[in-house]
C-alpha cells in the first residue's frame, strides 16, 4: 500500500497489486485508514523542498505518522535517513541533522524503528545524485569548492531497496540504527568524474577555497533552477563526510553493495529499462499542471508530449501508426522529416534512405527511416533515433480507446549530452512542438478517412 497526497497521479505508475491511498502526514486525521491491517510501515518522507521551516514540518509529519502507526498496532517502522555526525571539522548541516532528528521522533512514538543512515544514493530521484548529475551534465568546466573533496560512500539505489526489504524480516528486537554505504569510499568529485566518464562527457574540475555553501547554492540555483529551493540545504550537507563507521549492517543483512562504477552503470541501465517499459500516455495524462518549456524532466531526460482526439476506433488509429515512414511517409510532415534527413546525411548519419522492411507491419529491431523500433505493443510504438544528435532521442506513439473514438499521444524524449544537447533541445523546442502537432493531425486525418469500397 502506497500513501500519496495525490493518489490519482500515482496510480497509473504502480504495478498490479499495489494499492494507492490518499493521505497527508501533515494532516493526522487522514492517516488512521492508511494503517489498517499494516504490520510494517516504511517512512520515506521529507519536507526539504517546501517553503518555511522544513525541519519543523518534518518533526510534525514524523510525529503524526508514529502516533497513527502506534494506534493501529503497527509492529515496526522502517526509516531511511542520512549519514553524518558532528565529529571532524564541520558541524552537522541542518539537512542531515533534521534527517537524524526525524528518526528520533519516530522512535519516541513507541513503535520499534529500524533506521538506515545512508550516503549519496546512486539512482534517479536521489536529490544529492540528481544535483551532482545536473552539474556534471551542464558544466564542461566546474569551479568547485572544498566540498567536492569531501569523502562519501555512494550506494546504489537497488542496494538501498534490498536493505529496506530485508528489514521487514529482522527478528523483533526493538529499535536499531544501521549505517549503509557502497563497497568503496569516494569524494563527490570522484562521483562526478565517474558519471561523466560513463556518459562520454569531458569535464574539468578546478577546486578553489573561496566558495561558501551560500555562494555555491546561489550558483546552483542559476545553473539548475529545479534545485533553487533545496540547493543551499543540499550543499551544506555535502560539506559533511558521509561514510560508514559501523559495519553492523553487513553482519545483520546478506546485502553486499556494489562499488561506485557498477552503481553508476546500473543506475543508467535501469533508467533505460524503466523508460522503455513506461507507457507515457498513462504517466503523463495522470500528471497535473502545465508542461514547462522544453518538457518535463525524468532524470537526465526531457519529455515533451502532445495528445489529440481522433474520430476513429483505436484499432484503426493503431494500424495507421504502424504504417508510418517508408513509402507511406509521415502524414503531412514528410517534407520536414526529409529536410531533417538531408541535414543528417551532411553530418554522416543515415538520413531517410533506409525506408522500412514492410509497409504495414513492424517488429522490434526494424528500421523506420532514421528510427529503430525499440518496442511495439498493442496500441503503442516506441522508436529510437539513429540520426546524428548531441544525445539520445525516442518517439512514442500510443493510442487510448474512448468509446467509438480514441486519443493518440505523441511523446518525444531526449537524453541530452552536455551543454550542446541542452542547447539543441531548447532551441528547437518550438520546431519539435510544431512537427509533432502536425504529425498527430496527420494521423487523425488519415485514420478518419472512410475505408475504400
Image (cartoon, rainbow, N blue to C red):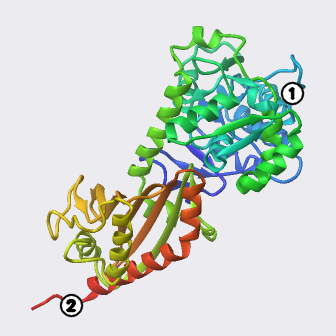
Which x, y percent locates residue 60? 83, 42
Tell me which corner region of the image, top left, top right, bottom left or bottom right, holds residue 160.
top right
Q: In the rendered view, tell whether residue 34 sits above or below residue 6.
A: above
244 displayed left or right of 348:
right
Compare residues 211 and 394 and report the one nearer the observer: 211
Compare residues 128 and 418 and report the one nearer the observer: 418
What is the secondary structure assignment of the residue under circle 1?
loop
What is the secondary structure assignment of the residue under circle 2?
loop
Which image quadrant: the C terminus?
A: bottom left
Query: Which dot, 2 or 1, sits closer to the camera?
Result: 1
Q: Residue 92 has which mark?
A: 1
Q: Decide: few, some or many residues near mark 1? Use Cα within 10 Å; few <14, some 14-19, many ≥20.
A: many
Q: In the rendered view, tell whether residue 103 sits above or below residue 60.
A: above
- Calculate the distance from the C-alpha at mark 2 to the C-alpha at mark 1: 70 Å
Of label 2 and label 1, which has the lower sequence position? 1
Assess whether mark 1 and mark 2 are in contact (beta carbons under 8 angstroms): no
The residue carrying mark 2 is: 450
Asked if one can make out residue 102 in the rendered structure from this viewpoint, the answer is no
Tell me which corner region of the image, top left, top right, bottom left or bottom right, holds residue 42.
top right
> What residue is rendered at 16% in x and 87% in y?
451
Compare residues 339 and 439 and report the one nearer the observer: 339
Which x, y percent locates residue 428? 53, 71
Q: In the rendered view, tell whether residue 81 sits above or below residue 221.
A: above
Asked if one can make out residue 311 in the rendered structure from this viewpoint, the answer is yes
Which x, y percent locates residue 275? 44, 50
Amino acid at each position: 500500500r502506497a500513501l500519496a497526497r495525490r493518489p490519482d497521479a500515482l496510480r497509473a505508475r504502480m504495478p498490479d497489486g499495489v494499492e494507492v491511498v490518499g493521505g497527508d502526514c501533515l494532516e493526522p486525521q487522514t492517516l488512521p485508514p492508511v494503517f489498517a491491517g499494516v504490520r510494517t510501515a516504511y517512512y520515506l518522507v521529507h519536507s526539504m523542498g517546501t517553503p518555511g521551516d522544513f525541519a519543523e514540518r518534518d518533526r510534525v509529519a514524523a510525529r503524526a505518522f508514529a502516533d497513527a502507526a502506534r494506534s493501529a498496532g503497527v509492529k515496526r517502522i522502517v526509516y531511511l535517513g542520512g549519514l553524518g555526525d558532528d565529529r571532524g571539522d564541520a558541524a552537522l548541516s541542518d539537512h542531515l541533522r533534521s534527517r537524524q532528528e526525524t528518526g528520533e521522533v519516530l522512535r519516541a512514538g513507541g513503535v520499534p524503528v529500524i533506521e538506515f543512515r545512508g550516503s549519496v544514493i546512486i539512482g534517479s530521484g536521489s536529490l544529492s545524485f540528481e544535483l551532482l548529475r545536473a552539474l556534471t551534465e551542464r558544466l564542461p568546466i566546474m569551479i568547485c569548492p572544498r566540498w567536492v573533496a569531501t569523502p562519501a560512500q555512494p550506494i546504489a539505489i537497488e542496494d538501498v531497496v534490498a536493505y529496506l526489504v530485508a528489514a521487514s524480516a529482522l527478528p523483533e528486537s526493538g529499535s536499531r540504527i544501521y549505517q549503509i554505504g557502497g563497497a568503496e569510499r569516494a569524494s563527490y568529485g570522484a562521483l562526478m568524474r565517474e558519471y561523466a566518464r560513463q556518459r562520454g562527457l569531458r569535464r574539468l574540475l578546478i577546486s578553489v577555497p573561496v566558495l561558501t555553501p551560500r555562494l555555491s547554492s546561489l550558483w546552483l540555483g542559476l545553473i539548475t533552477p529545479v534545485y533553487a529551493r533545496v540547493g543551499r540545504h543540499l550543499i551544506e550537507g555535502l560539506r559533511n563526510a558521509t561514510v560508514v563507521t559501523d559495519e553492523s549492517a553487513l553482519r545483520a543483512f546478506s546485502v553486499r553493495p556494489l562499488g561506485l562504477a557498477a552503481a553508476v552503470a546500473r543506475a543508467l541501465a535501469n533508467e533505460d529499462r524503466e523508460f522503455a517499459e513506461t507507457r507515457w500516455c498513462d504517466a503523463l495524462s495522470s500528471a497535473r499542471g502545465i508542461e514547462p518549456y522544453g518538457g518535463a524532466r525524468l532524470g537526465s531526460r526531457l519529455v515533451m508530449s502532445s495528445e489529440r482526439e481522433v474520430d476513429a476506433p483505436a484499432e484503426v488509429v493503431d494500424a495507421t501508426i504502424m504504417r508510418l515512414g517508408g513509402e507511406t511517409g509521415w502524414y503531412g510532415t514528410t517534407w520536414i522529416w526529409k529536410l531533417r534527413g538531408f541535414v543528417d546525411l551532411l553530418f554522416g548519419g543515415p538520413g531517410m534512405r533506409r525506408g522500412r522492411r514492410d509497409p504495414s507491419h513492424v517488429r522490434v529491431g526494424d528500421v523506420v527511416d532514421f528510427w529503430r523500433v525499440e518496442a511495439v505493443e498493442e496500441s503503442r510504438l516506441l522508436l529510437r533515433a539513429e540520426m546524428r544528435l548531441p544525445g539520445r532521442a525516442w518517439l512514442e506513439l500510443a493510442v487510448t480507446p474512448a468509446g467509438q473514438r480514441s486519443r493518440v499521444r505523441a511523446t518525444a524524449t531526449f537524453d541530452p549530452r552536455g551543454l550542446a544537447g541542452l542547447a539543441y533541445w531548447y532551441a528547437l523546442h518550438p520546431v519539435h512542438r510544431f512537427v509533432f502537432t502536425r504529425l498527430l493531425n496527420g494521423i487523425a486525418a488519415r485514420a478518419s478517412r472512410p475505408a475504400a469500397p
